[in-house]
Image: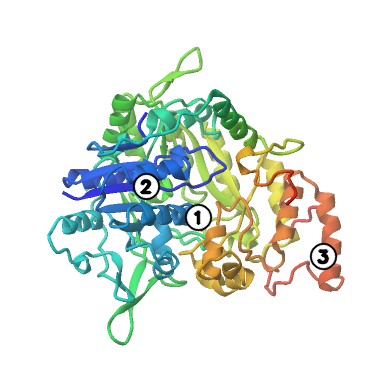
Amino acid sequence: MAKILFINPMVREEEDPKHIPMGIAQLASIAINAGHQVQVYDQNAWRKDDAIVKEILISDEWDVVGIGGITTAYASIKKIVKLVSRCCPKTLIALGGGVLTSLPKETMKWLPEVDLGFVGESYKTIVDLLNALDTENPNLENVKGLILRKNDKIIFTPQRELLHNLDELPYPAYDLFPIQEIYFKNSAMMYSEEGMLATRRMDINGSLGCSLVCKFCYHLGIIGDMRYEKNENGEVNRIAFDEEGSFTRNIRFHSTDYIINQAVYLKKKYDVNFIYFLDENFMTMDVYSKRTWLKGICKGWKEAGLVPKKKKDGTWDGVYWSGTSHATLCNPEILKIMAEHGCSHLVYGYEHFDDRILKTIGKGSNRKTNLRSFFWTLKAGIRPIPNQIIGFPTEDFDSLRMQMKAWDDLGIVTKPHFATPYPGSLWFTEYRNEILDQYKGQGKKFGLSDDLEAYVMDLGDASRVSAVISRNFNAVELIGLREMMMHKQYDKIDQYEKEWRQKHGIKPGQPSTLVDEDISKFKKIKISA
Amino acid sequence: MSLLKGNFKVKKPIKEKKLTEQKKLEEIFEKSAKQRLGGSMVYVSKSKVNWDLDEK
């Protein structure tokens, strides 16, 4: 049997760790079921210094140290990889997750200590890799879904197929994470009263993918959106993702029985009082299932005795839950049923309230559906969490005011995210050259491989500015405008608009924008202090 | 409390230095203060101070 140490890198340092990393927890469970020796160190949960991480690394002799995470964990990953290389020189270092799949060749170049990477979904790859390492002369080129170093080259092994039936997956290895020590203490989520009062929250992921084509989003192969491109010699030299006009959307979801059994398992084993569904978009699965999936979950929740009942002291029996919705795909009927079965809040990626902006992002929603779903959700008794973004490519003063007006009308208190072109997204492909321009010289300045690595190092969760894709505003302006928007300072925005027009030489009567687009068909609302 | 969790016992136990009560309090304070940044709220992260008053 092979011996593997999984390490979960640190992400969102400014926040308490709230979520057991689902990918690593699933892979650890799969590896154990396949008969291998597994340990997990959750650096995001423990946040220990390098001295402790070194102690962990030398606590045994590992065949593989597997590190994985999303792109925003890159800085932590880079640090950990260097420690592993120093402390465990004979151990294979494997990297997986979105950080690797979004830019596989670049990441292997930036992190020369990494021996191999998991490209795309790795449920089957992890077993094949560990089984291969168990043999006398492992040939990793036969393991699908990897990126490897061979002599001086970086090569891809054949593309890994997706798992057809998600119900084949074991439950994540929750026990290998500090549930009592860390995660239960951070159970509260400030999204609803029940979320805030949750004391024993755990997460379930009921589905993979989404049917929509938002330009800022990325799926990195899990919906069949990844293809291997070959050069003239027949060698795979590039991984590409869906491009505009050509989308694959192979969405998958667990059966309702699987989800209910998992919820019952969490209730019995950990006495959870809240379950957060990590699913990318609940409603897209519900529509795909012809509106049977969410009703099935609600029915199962009731049959399993999980529907929460409030007690006088504010606590409850049963399990409240929450998830994600979509403005256009939800309807009053399903929202009411969800509320009756314990759904306390739903996260909506409304992003904006100006149709001119929404039209450009592939979201499949508009101002009307955003407003409609907002009131439907409230009326059903569920708190909507209306995520907001500013700094879209065609964002201008009018669209910002439209956004503020909606916040005023709907009572939304928000600190919006900035539009960010994450690797793997359509935006990243479209704006790659502009990103590199903005980070020109930063790679050399900070001792990194190149400017793109500097950008990836800088990426956060979009609550702060990184690369700007707005045609009208720079980073400083966006930060300032966001501050004024949050404080409802319409007059200050009007004042800055005058200065901005002067700076850019906009003639009287012309709209305040540098973007050449036909905006005549969009309704204009005059909003001012 | 075990930093490593798995399905077997590792060969070498992990030694973690015990924090003094003062250090524990310092960590709790700095973590709480960081979460309340804004307005006039400001604090010094002691472990990140990397200069002293001695002019060289």
Give the residue pinned by disc 2: A7
Q: CA distance from mark 2 to mark 3?
A: 48 Å
Q: Secondary structure at mark 1?
A: helix
Amino acid of disc 1? Ala
Amino acid of disc 2? Ile
Amino acid of disc 3? Trp
Q: Confirm or deny contact between disc 3 and disc 1 (CB under 8 A).
A: no
> What residue lies at 60% left-to-right and 58% top-to-bottom?
A419
Sequence-first tag of 2 and 1: 2
Of residues A112 and A236, which is closer to you in this image? A112
Same chain assignment for discs 2 and 1: yes
Sequence-first tag of 3 and 1: 1
Give the residue pinned by disc 3: A500
Label 2: chain letter? A
Give the residue pinned by disc 1: A75
Q: Secondary structure at mark 3?
A: helix
> What residue lies at 43% left-to-right and 33% top-to-bottom?
A183
Residue A447, position as x, y percentages in the image? 55, 66
Residue A113, position as x, y percentages in the image? 38, 62
Residue A169 appears in the figure: no
Residue closest to the far front? B56
Nearest-to-viewer mark from 2 and 3: 2
Q: Secondary structure at mark 2?
A: strand
> What residue lies at 27% left-to-right and 83% top-to-bottom?
A234
Residue A62, position as x, y percentages in the image? 26, 50
